[in-house]
Image (cartoon, grey):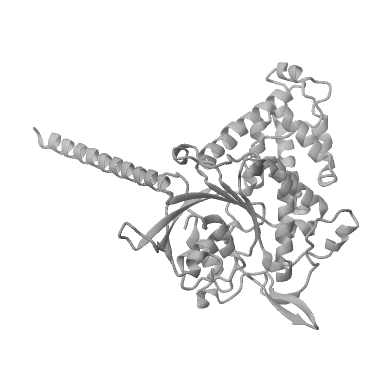
Amino acid sequence: MSERDASFDSGRGRRVKHRLRRLHREVRDKSLWVAERLLDRRVCVGITGLSGAGKSTLLTSLIYQLSHPQKAQLPGFAPALNGDLLGAELKPALDSGLPPFDYEQCLAALMSQPPRWPESTREESAMELHIHLRRRRHLTGRDTKTLILELRDYPGEWLMDLPLLRMDYRDWCRHQAHLIGTDSRAGLAPQLISELAALDPGATAQPARLEALWQDYRQFLLDCRGQRKLSYLQPGRALLDRENYGLVPMLDLRGYSSEQLEALSEETNYQFLAQRYRDYVRKRVVPFVENHFRHLDRQLVLVDMIGTLFAGEQALDDMRLAFDHIADTFRYGQSGFLRKLWRPRVDRLLFAATKADQVLAADHDNLRQLLGQQLLQAFAGARHRGLPLYCEAIAAVRCSNEGVRNGRRMLMGHDLEGRYLGFENAEICAQVPRDGEAWNHYSGTAPPQLRPPAGMAAGGCIPHIRVDALLNLLLGDKV
């Protein structure tokens, strides 16, 4: 054998050995994953948040609290209170194919001088938090155990697209026509609405015109969120990127039956846009559901309840409508022995009203009750299928302190520019206002946006409100 042939065989042998070692690692990792699932040592939690709810901040705070038990204040989380929480390690998620959550960068933002909020995430991410606990009763001879908390986070805007799975393009057009005709969206884009209503389903499609309508429709969605604080906006991805999805609704389909619309040629407006709709659902929504939701055991949804409440009745109605339409998109119920591996179901659904530090402590329970009212009707069917539904009021990072000025309780903190301020706002009532006049209670200025508190790096802790209670709801039965 020549020297060249020997070198070739040697190189091929190394490649084969490398592939065999990689295969061995993959089989070992998968075997560990299967064992952890079956022994209930791994729980997968999906985390999302409606716009502005502070998902990145909550993830950062949650990871930090569990990783630094000697500094954290978690009296509502039993392992921390009993001294059984030993710490946690952040690791890449096995077999997820998703980028890791950038915990270090988010933590650096909170700990910087001056402190700042982490950047919002616009894509999916995944991570594992290996939570180490002291074992009180053990037959294995080990003094510790580890619970693997698999965290999968995704933008809340994607959640708004899940109802598209149950609608064809005609259904979606009729649904959007109803939404756009409501007061909450009226007046934002009258010219666009007129043009969408004037689109003739049977006319030959003009791609350049439809492209211009898409750009205007995307801006309309952004204005709905920015100016009216609306939540139920589709397609949700249009709020996060500038990709040309070309997905616009036709607002007037009168005069066409379902059969007549389906019989139109591919060159018509209706069929051109219907194909865009099908492409969006097939390429964006279906893979998201299949690759993300099929893993989840539990789901946490963060809600900026305070911002929505002070935005007015229409914003709150739109949030409730969003809840109505996403209520049946999760797979609810208990997961049996084998279902844990292949098709787990969401067995616990949590909603958390964030930024509770924007209102007085006396209002926290009312804030939670208000959120519960919004969920009560939307998730009635889920509760009938045995799904435990929970809600909480939290602040992932507490930015204010309470004090008394001129005999009145106030909140004090720093605004986003770092200016010290004291403020008070309307009392949060436990019931949703029944009429327009009652909404005047919230017609004043919304609470100011606050900067993270300074000195967290020096003190070694992140102050919070009821993150421990949230952890107890998420993991209390697992630890």
Which sits in the foreground, 19 or 316?
A: 316
Which residue is pictured at 34% across the width and 63% down the height?
143
- Return the residue nearer the eye: 207 or 111: 111
Q: How many numbered marks are there?
A: 0
- How far from the left and from the top, in percent, is residue 137? 38, 61
Instruction: Residue at the far right: name it.
Output: 437
462 above or below 333? Answer: below
Residue lying at the far bottom of the rendered structure: 406
List x then y, in percent, for residue 141. Answer: 30, 60
User: Is residue 188 visible in the rendered structure shown here?
Assistant: yes
Indicate the position of residue 270 as horizontal and vertical percent values: 73, 25
Which of the 4 quarters of the picture holds residue 25?
Answer: top left
Q: Is residue 74 left or right of residue 29?
A: right
Position of the N terminus, as image quadrant, is top left
> Residue 219, can we see it?
no
Whether residue 129 sits left or right of residue 334 in the image: it is left
> Which residue is at 74% across, 62% downward?
366
User: Measured along the vertical axis of the image, is residue 435 above or below residue 416?
Assistant: above
User: Relative to residue 199, is residue 106 depicted above or below?
Assistant: below
**Where in the figure is residue 27, as x and y percent of width and height?**
32, 41
